[in-house]
Structure formats: structure tokens, C-alpha cells
Amino acid sequence: MPTLTADPCVSCAQHRAQSLVRLGISTDRWDYLIALAGNPNVGKSTVFNELTGLRQHTGNWPGKTVARAEGAFVHEGKRAKVVDLPGTYSLLAGSVDEEVARDFVLFGRPDVTVVVVDATRLERNLNLVLQILEITDRVVVFLNLVDEARRHGIAVDSSKLERELGVPVVQGVAREGAGIDDLVSAVHEVALGTHAVSAVRVEQHTDEVEAALDELAPVIQDAFPEVPNPRWVALRLLNADEAVEGAVLSGELGQLSHDESGAVVEIAPVEARQRVRKTAMSLRWGLPSDFQDVVTGRAYEVAEQIAVRVQVRGLKKVGFAFDRKMDQWLTSRIFGFPLMLFILAAVFWITIEGANIPSSILATVLIDNGHGALKALAAGLGIPLWLDGLLLDGVYLATAWVVAVMLPPMAIFFPLFTLLEDFGYLPRVAFNLDALFRKAGAHGKQALTMCMGFGCNAAGVVATRVIDSPRERLVAIITNNFSLCNGRWPTQILIATIFIGALAPSQLGGLISAGAVVGIALLGIVMMFLSSWILTRTVLRGEATSFSLELPPYRPPRILRTLYTSIIDRTLIVLWRAVIFAIPAGAVIWLISNVDVSGVSLAHHAVGWLDPAGLLLGMNGVILLAYVVAIPANEIVIPTVLMLTVLTGGSAVGEGAGVMFELDSVNATGELLRAGGWTLLTGVNLMLFSLLHNPCSTTIYTIYKETRSTKWTVVATLMPLVMGLTVCFLVAQVWRLAAG
């Protein structure tokens, strides 16, 4: 039996390299298929990464919004494809996650199903194991978090558990790599058939149920000969499982199975399908009314009995008191919110302050030096002025601004955020905010997606995959834009410093401007609650879903792995999308600024057309045009505003007509904007509009990818824009009335 070995070399890199070659996303061919199942928060993703490497292919299941991850590895010359199933407590198909997991285990025909089990919550986890064993006996159980169980004073006899279940049981600690080699060996043996298994199944139902199963299973087998476990299908039909019944009537039950050649099995005749349905309905009426509860209760009863026999409790607890003390503070009704705001404020402050120097360096290298060097090179090569301007003053500068402004804060924020997640704090944030989100009709997990949105709204939209309910996930997607992303922080800080901080004495200017920015961020949270409340009482009407939130243990964050995953999986992917959209934006900005009509640039015409609306909103045409042409990325709004201000005002500042730029000091920027007619009202409403406007193109694209709906993408785009225009209009009118 594979067990956790005390050999210190078991998890070392040299040992691992001899037995396991990770292939990341190289899943084009394989010798056997592995399904990775488990309850939520049992370390399943960690096991996946340990098996396949940190790179993975992520997408949605066909017809579902549930995310899947695929990876691969090689062991002893055999390629294995690993499919990470959604975390689920059951296979009874009460949710989309459960349906996906069940269908893959039943119809996907994995060669091995690895069930990751939390050693601290063995009884509940064993319920899922027993359900999977009802479908297939090609199972390996990975008993994870044995170190955490020890902290709780619990020990699990893995040898006894293996005898109880009839399948291999491997214990370990996935985040430390312990037990992974033993797991790979066990999977390899089961896949090749060299390890005999005799899975234990919950078959001790009442005599009535057993008689019904014995009668119905042969009928299913006759209609669908390729179904691997007709007895389990029979049990689900007797339980009136609508999904399984629908699969029977449509023929999908057979279509989802494949023969050895990979050809799709022909649909069973209508008569055979109807016979299955009629037999199931007839037998169902002969069963007791509490039949379903009895069957479910029996599974939990068996899981409890097994857990009692294999667990040793009452051992000395090691370090458990630390978690309790931390939670007394971090989830306290009195201190929980203040500490949460302090921690998040610290993350934002570190992000903003820490990004200043690298952003300045990147701006110097890419814009001050790089742009000049490229211009000189273009001149030396004799490139036409129009092509030089389009490519270098337009495309290159827009891309350079996005990289210089966007990369440093994301490279700081995402690792910090991931460290908090790895430490175990983010579930505490969801716990603290759950009540507020439920009052707004939203899901408590939206607190996590909101926090991610402060780094990048596109990343926040992707993070909504943690929400099970499609309706509540849609609410989170639509309202995520109200989280003030890092692309908008520079605009907020600059305008607050110029127009609000300047109102206070010099020694208090920084504090006042920082307070104004924090106020804008808090207003965004208020608008998120308000818009969620409106959506859940109108077009997305429904009750908030309750969810069980398990607070994971506090653990020392894995610094190097966190840096790798956050930079590769989040920062660079989001940055790449932003760059893709910034390229055409740069071209458009240069063209409208340099193509003349009647001796005046298109930008000058557009500003003139938009000025009346801009003034009505307490802003101007320059701001409105900047937000139209800079929709790909908020990072280029300020350079575009300065360029348009100079272009329309005739000032001799900047790099020339149609060239985006930034000035060396805040004071110089303020003087230029005031010369362009800006007032305190203009600055205030720009801050409000920066918060309440349409998402950037990267976020819009991500929304469409996640929803696959043009309708909801349009709603998510227009709703904040309408709210922003309305708020700015009202503020402008009240401001002018107050001013007389």
C-alpha cells in the first residue's frame, strides 16, 4: 500500500525528476485519462499543479460556465492527461458543478478517478468517495492535509481506510509535495490494471429498493449497453433525477459513451428508452415516500461508520490555538471590518507607492529614451513621416504607456493578493462581507471577486467562477467594474492632488488628496451594492443563495510559487490582452489628431461637437473624447487628455501635434489643465466619471468570454456608463446652483 514515507528525499526535486515529468498544458495525446475530484477547499488544485506543473489549460465545459483545467505528466514512459473536475460535495446533480463532475466520471470514462480527501473532515469527504465508487471502482484516494489533521489532534489509519474502501489510499501534504510520488505510482498501477481493486459499494438498501434495482438495471443495460454502471443509473432514476431521466429520453445517456475506436454509439431506439422510463416510474411508485432521504441517509451513515473506524481522535493539538486567536480578531463583529479595511488599504498603498519607481523607470526607458531612439532610427531609414507618426507616435506610445503604467502595479498587487489568499485570509473577507452582499441580493463570494477587481476588472470577472449560481455570478460580473482597478488609480491620484489637495495647506495636501481617492473607492463599493440590489430585484430577480464557507487553516504563504503564479497566470495574461487592444487605440488616437478636415484635425472637430455635452456634465469635450478613444485601456486616458488639451488650446507643450505625453511634475500638469479651462468641478466630475464609466475593452472582451452573451455584455458595458453620466450631470447642476 502506498503511504506517506519518512524519506526526506521523497519530495526533493532530484527524486521527483526521476519519476515524474510535468507537461503543463501539453495534453494533445495520452495513454490514460485521470479525473481529479474532491470537495471544495481540499487542496485539489494544489494536487493538480503538483502533478502537471504550474501551467494549465483553463476553459469552460461545453455548454457550461463552469471552468475546467487540464494538464499532463509522464510517468515511466506513459503520458497521463489530468482533468480537474469542479469541486463538489455530491454527485446528485443539485448544481451545475455537480452535474459536470458526475457526467465526466460516468460518461467520460476516465481510466482513474483520483478523489482528494481532507483528512480533517473525513466523514463528509467520504460521502463523495462512496458516491464515486458507486459509478467506478477505478479510484485512488489521496488523503490530503494530514499535517493539518495532526494540528487538530486527529490521525487517520490509511491502511485501514484502504481496506474499508477497497481502493488504494495515499496520504500526504500536497502543498509540500509529500505523497505525490506515491500517488503517481498508485494511479499508474490502477490505470494499467496491475493493482487489483475491489471497491466497496453502498448496496445495503432496504429489500424494496434492492428488488427495484434488480428489476430496473437489466432494462437499462439492454437499452444502453455501453453504460458502465446501470445500477447507479437505476438508483438515480428511482430518485427522480431529472438530468439522468432527460439523458435517457433524449438518448444522450448512450451518446455520451464511446467504444474503443472512439466512435459515437448510436442512439437507442425510442421504444427502449420509453421502456426504461416507464419501468422506473412504475417501480418508483412502489417505493416509500421517504425513499430518497433513506438512500441519502444510508450513504452518510456508511461514511460516518468508516470514518469512526479509521480515525484516532483526542491526540495532542499542535498550533491549533493560533487559528482560533486569529479568527477572534479577523472575523470579529467589532474588529473584523476595521482590520479588513486596514489590510486592504495597506495592499493598495504598497501597490501605489511601490509602483511609482518601476513605472518611472519603464516610462524613461520605453517613452523618454525608447521613443526618441526609434524616431531617430526611423528618420535614418527614411521612413515616411505619416508611417513614422502612425507606428511610433500612435501605436508604440499607446502600448508603451499601457506597459509602463499597468505592469508595475499589477506585478505588486496580484502577488500581494495571492499571498493573502495563500495565507488563508481571503475567505475571512468573504465571511465578513457575506451579510452585506446577501442584503443586496448578491452572493457572499462576490466579496472575493470585488477585491480581485481592485487589481484588474478583467481578472475580477474571471474570478467570478468561484460563484456557483449562474444568476449571482452574472450579478458579480456586471457590477465588478465598480471596483477601482489599477488602471484608474493614477488618474484618481493625479486629479485629486491637483484640484483637491491644493485646497488644503501644503502639509495636509497629500493626506486630503489620499482621503479623496479612498472616498472614491468606497463610493465604488456603495455603487456595487446599489447596482446589485437593483439587478436582483429587476432583470435578475431571485433570492440570494446561501453557501457553506469553510475557513481554511492559516498557513505560511509560499513566496516563490506565489510570485510565479500571480505574475504568469494573472499579470502577464491581463497585460497581454491590454496591449492587444492598445495597439489599434494608439493608431486611432494618432489618426484623429493628425488627419485634417477643412484645415482642422478630426480631434479638434470632435472636441467641438462634444463640448456642449461635456460642459453640461461638468467636464468638457476633451475628457469625453479621451474616454472614447482610450477605451482599450484606462492607462492612456491622462496622456490622451494632455495631448488633446494642447491640440485644441494651441499650447506649445508636449512632443508635438497628435503625440501623447505626460509632464514631469504635478504642478506643470495642473497649470496646463487650468489653462485649458479646468476647474474644481471639472476635476471632481472627472474623478467620478473615472469610477463610473464603461469597462475597458479588455474587461468587455473578458465579460463576453465568460458569459457568451452579447446581451449581458452590453448591459455590463452600458449600465455603469449611464450611471456615470447621470451622477456627473446631477453633481454639475447642484454645484452650479450652490455657486449661484
Image (cartoon, rainbow, N blue to C red):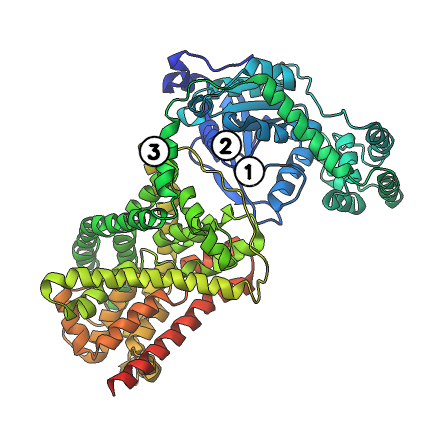
Task: Determine whether label 2 and label 1 are within 8 Å by CB.
Answer: yes
Using the rendered image of the protein, determine whether residue 569 is visible from the camera's viewpoint.
Answer: yes
* CA gap, disc 2 and disc 1: 9 Å
- Residue located at (61% from left, 19% from top): 190
Q: Which residue lies furthest to the left in this view?
A: 506
Looking at the rendered image, the quarter that the C terminus falls into is bottom left
Q: Which amino acid does label 2 sit on?
A: Val
Looking at the rendered image, the quarter that the N terminus falls into is top right
Residue 103, compared with residue 21, is above or below; it is: below
Q: State the residue position of label 3.
A: 557
Q: Earlier in the sequence, mark 2 or mark 3?
A: 2
Percent from the top left, x then y, of residue 3? 51, 14
* CA gap, disc 2 and disc 3: 17 Å
Q: State the residue position of label 2.
A: 42
- Residue located at (39% from left, 33% from top): 324
Instruction: Assess disc 2: are there few (<14), some (14-19) or many (≥20) residues with their C-alpha within 10 Å of its C-alpha.
Output: many
Give the image quarter of residue 660: bottom left
Instruction: Assess disc 1: are there few (<14), some (14-19) or many (≥20) residues with their C-alpha within 10 Å of its C-alpha.
Output: many
Residue 71, compared with residue 141, is above or below; it is: below
Helix, strand or loop under label 3 = loop
Helix, strand or loop under label 2 = loop
* CA gap, disc 1 and disc 3: 22 Å
On the picture, is 462 further left or further right than 456? right
